[in-house]
Image (spheres, helix red, strand yellow):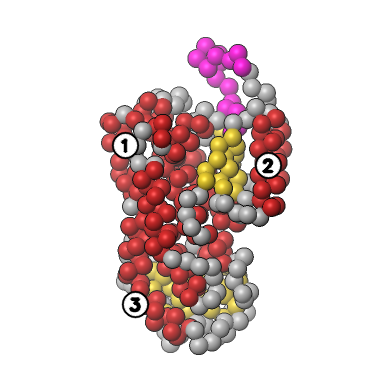
């Protein structure tokens, strides 16, 4: 597969990719729409749940991992993510159960919500009101945050704003997250030239490589995994997101680059790795030291290093910015490979 960066500024090629790119660019609008949709219910839930702080917080359902990435480092009470069916055996009336169900059609999530209602757990569910999960939510201690977009991140922002108001999570403002997504959409839009478009530049930089992705914080690492999934779907090639101790041996074992190789005349060989660092601006010295180890190892073996820097204000906005930029780059990779 040969990548043609000329297609990234080709109107016809971009027109074919327009539905996916437009959907990505509308991320900020979806966050605002969910915030408006759930505002009244969110205020009512804060009033009810503020009366008694929970013994623990259980994030249930397949989408609980995003909540864990945000809340686990800062939640002042024990926090458990339970992505499988049901609930932990110890969860009861003293424990707050929170559930993200953007489309609301997962039977396992619906069963977990029904179990929380049966046990009398204080419960908050972000899901469409008329969905399967929504129909299992009503109960004496239940709170429904109605959602309308089916967008996981937008749904999560609503729940995280609730947790912020309850003093159980970091500062979260839906408008700040929406602005971060809008900024990425403007910077990475399809009709912004390759020379000044960070997502197109990134796609060109990693197009002929097997990317190795790293994020130094819990949220940046999650963004790296999500971007790696998008890159694999776009190219059909390997893209690995992992911790530094797993990436360092891969970088060290990379074969040396052949500066005399002719990519057109020589037989095709396995693509060399590249290192893609997702930087959310963490001031943690351990993160900075680990990033230096990775980049030094890559430089020592002639491996290309690309960095995506978050533009958002706050942990959730920074995560959204990293994820959106990486996903734009994955779509542009697909555009550039479509002409092969």
Q: Main secondary structure of the magenta part?
A: loop
Which residue extends farthest top?
265
The one of 2 and 259 positioned closer to us in this rendering: 259
Give the left or right position of residue 328, taking residue 79 as reference.
left
Q: Which residue is mark 2?
A: 292
Q: Which residue is mark 3?
A: 40
| SS under mark 1 | loop
Q: Nearer the viewer, mark 3 or mark 2?
A: 2
What residue is disc 1 on?
Answer: 191
Pick the residue in front: 61 or 143.
Answer: 143
Which stretch did the figure color magenta? 259-274
Magenta stretch holds residue 123 = no
Q: Residues within 10 Å of mark 3 (few under 14, many from 20)?
A: few
Whole-percent x and y of residue 161? 45, 70
- Disc 1 to disc 2, C-alpha distance: 35 Å
**Where does the image place residue 38, in percent across and percent down from the top left?**
35, 72
Q: Residue at x 39, y 82 (%)?
A: 44
> Measured from the top left, where is residue 181 in percent x and y?
40, 53
Q: Do we see residue 246 in this rendering?
A: no
Res 143 quadrant in image = bottom left
């Amino acid at each position: 597969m040969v990548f043609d960066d000329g297609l990234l500024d080709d109107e016809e090629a971009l027109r074919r990719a327009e539905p996916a790119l437009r959907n990505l660019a509308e991320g900020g609008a979806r966050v605002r729409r969910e915030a408006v949709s759930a505002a009244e219910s969110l205020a009512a839930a804060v009033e009810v749940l503020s009366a008694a702080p929970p013994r623990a917080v259980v994030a249930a359902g397949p989408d609980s991992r995003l909540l864990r990435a945000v809340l686990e480092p800062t939640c002042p009470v024990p926090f458990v993510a339970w992505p499988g069916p049901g609930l932990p055996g110890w969860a009861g009336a003293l424990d707050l159960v929170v559930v993200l169900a953007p489309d609301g059609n997962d039977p396992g999530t619906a069963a977990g919500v029904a179990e929380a209602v049966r046990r009398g757990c204080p419960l908050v569910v972000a899901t469409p009101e008329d969905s399967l999960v929504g129909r299992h939510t009503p109960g004496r201690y239940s709170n429904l945050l109605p959602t309308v977009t089916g967008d996981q991140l937008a749904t999560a922002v609503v729940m995280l704003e609730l947790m912020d108001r309850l003093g159980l999570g970091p500062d979260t403002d839906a408008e700040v997250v929406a602005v971060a997504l809008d900024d990425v959409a403007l910077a990475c839009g399809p009709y912004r030239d390759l020379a000044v478009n960070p997502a197109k530049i990134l796609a060109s930089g990693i197009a002929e490589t097997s990317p190795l992705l790293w994020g130094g914080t819990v949220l940046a690492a999650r963004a790296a995994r999500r971007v790696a999934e998008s890159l694999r779907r776009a190219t059909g090639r390997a893209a690995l997101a992992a911790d530094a101790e797993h990436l360092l041996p891969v970088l060290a074992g990379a074969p040396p680059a052949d500066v005399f190789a002719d990519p057109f005349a020589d037989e095709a060989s396995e693509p060399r790795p590249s290192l893609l660092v997702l930087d959310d601006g963490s001031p943690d010295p351990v993160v900075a030291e680990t990033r230096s180890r990775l980049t030094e190892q890559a430089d020592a073996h002639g491996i290309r290093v690309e960095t995506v820097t978050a533009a958002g204000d706050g942990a959730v906005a920074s995560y959204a910015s990293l994820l959106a930029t990486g996903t734009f780059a994955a779509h542009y990779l697909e555009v550039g490979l479509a002409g092969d």
